Amino acid sequence: MLIKIKTKPKKFSQYKKIIHQPLYEEVLKLAKNLKGIRVAHLNATAGVGGVSEVIRSLAPLMNSVGLKTDWFILPSNNQFFTITKEFHNSLQGKKWKLSQRNKKFYLDYLKKAAKGFPADKYDVLVFHDPQTLALIDFLDVNKTIWRCHVDTQKPNRQVWNFLIQYIKKYDKVIFSLKEYSGHAVVRSKIRIVPPAIDALSVKNKKYPGKKARRVILQCGLNIDRPIITQISRFDPWKDPIGVIKAYRLAKKSIAGLQMAYIGFNLTKDDPEAARIYKKTKKAAGNDKDIHLFFDQKDLGDLNIDQFIAAFQTGSDIILQKSIVEGFGLTVTEGMWKGKPVIGGKVGGIKLQIRNGQNGFLVTNPEDCAKTIVRLFKNPKEAKRVSQSAKESVRTNYLMPRLLRDYLKIMVEIL
C-alpha cells in the first residue's frame, strides 16, 4: 500500500520579499481558479534526493495557496528499486537488457502497492519518474501528470519502448528540458518545466559562516586551506572519479587544495551507491586531503541539510562534474549561496549556467582543473560570477516559479 508522508506547513507569503513581484501576483491569480482541488504527488521515497526535496516544499506551498495536496511514496523493496535504478540509468543511455521477469516483477509490485489507494478522490495525480509510472494501470484516476526528472535524450530503446505505453496514458507529461521530450510522446501533452529549490528550507537559508567553518573543521579539513566540494550521490553519472582526477591536476598549481565529496547513503532507491563508493574510495587512495562522506555516522549531530549547507557555505568552489544530469539542484543551491560553480557541460547544468557569466561549464577533468586554478588565481572574477549566479537563481529557479508552472498545467487539464 502507498504510504502517506506528512509535510510541514509553509506560507507562500514568506516569498513576497524574495522573488520578483509579478511572479508572486501571478501565482495568487492562478491559485484562485484552483482553490479546493485535491492533488496527490506520488514518488519512490521520502529520503534525501532532488525529487523528494522538491515535493517536500512544493506540496505545502500548494496547500498554502488554497489547494488540498497530499504526498505518497512506495513501500520499500530492494528488488524493485534495483530494477527501477536500471530503468533510471537506461533512460540516460545505459545498455541494459530488460527481461520479462523484471517487467513482471515491476508491474506486480505496483499492482500490489496500488491496492486500497483512493485515487478517485483526487482531481489531479502527479506521478514522478519511472518508479511510479505504471501505477496508472492499477488506479481509478481522474486527471494525471507524469513528471520525468531524468535526461532522456538518448534512452535505451528497449526500456523506453516498454515505458512509453504507460507514458502515453497521461494527460500531461513534464520534462525538465525540451531536448528530453523527443521520443514518441504526443507533442500536445508535453510541458517543459525545470525544477527549483526552496529558498526557505534549512539547506538554502543563509548559513552562519562561523558555524560552517566549525562543521568543516570537525570533519577533518583545514579551514585555512582552499576547499572544493561536490555534493552528489555516489553514482557513475556524477563522475566521482573524474572529480578526483580534476582535484589532483589542480593541486599541482594550488598548494594545499582539499576536496570533499558528499554523498551520504540515506536513500532506499539507489542500491548501486555502495559499489560506486568503494570504487571512488579506491581511486582516492591514501590522499588525506580527499574527504569522502558516505556513512550516516559522519553526520554527527547534524542533519543532512545542515551538513550540506555548511560545506556549500564554507567551500571556495562548488563542483557538479556530471557526465549526464537531468537538472542538477546542487548546482542551483551553490549558485544561490553565491559560490562559483563548475559543472559538466550536460543536460540541465547547461540550462542553468551561462559559461563565464554565472558559472563555468567543463567537459573533462583537465578543463575542470584549469577552471579551478583560474578561479583561485582570479578572486575578482570568482566574485563577479557568484553574484550573477545568485540573481539568475532568484529569477528562474526558486520554488514559486515551479509552483506557478504546475498551477498553469492544472488549469489546462481541469
Image (cartoon, helix red, strand yellow):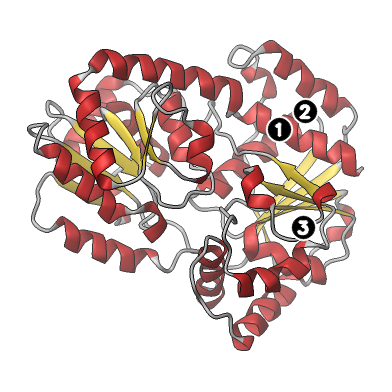
The amino acid sitting under disc 2 is: Val
* Numbered badge on residue 210: none
First in sequence: mark 2 vs mark 1: 2
Q: Position of residue 80 (x, y in %)?
A: 57, 74
Give the amino acid at mark 1. Answer: Leu
Image side of residue 256 versus residue 343, left or right: left
Rate crowding at label 2 as few (under 14), some (14 to 19) or many (20 or more) other CA atoms within 10 Å. many
Q: Residue at x 10, y 33 (%)?
A: 253
Residue at 33% x, 38% y is 319
Q: Position of residue 364 (x, y in %)?
A: 31, 47
Of the pair 160 and 295, the residue shown nearer to us = 160
- 369 is higher (above) or lower (below) than 295: above
Q: Nearer the viewer, mark 2 or mark 1?
A: 1
Q: Residue furthest bottom?
A: 101
Residue receiving disc 3:
185
Q: Which mark is residue 65?
A: 2
Sequence-earlier tag: 1 or 3: 3
Q: Which numbered disc covers residue 403?
A: 1
Three-letter amino acid code of the residue under disc 3: Val
Q: Residue 282: x percent and y percent?
A: 18, 63
Q: Judge from the rendering whether residue 46 lies leftward or rightward of residue 189; answer left or right.
A: left
Position of residue 99 measured from the top left corner of the image (x, y, whole percent): 59, 85
Quadrant housing the N terminus: bottom right
Q: Secondary structure at mark 3?
A: loop
Could you tell me how far apart the alpha carbons at marks 1 and 3 are, in whole angstroms?
Answer: 24 Å
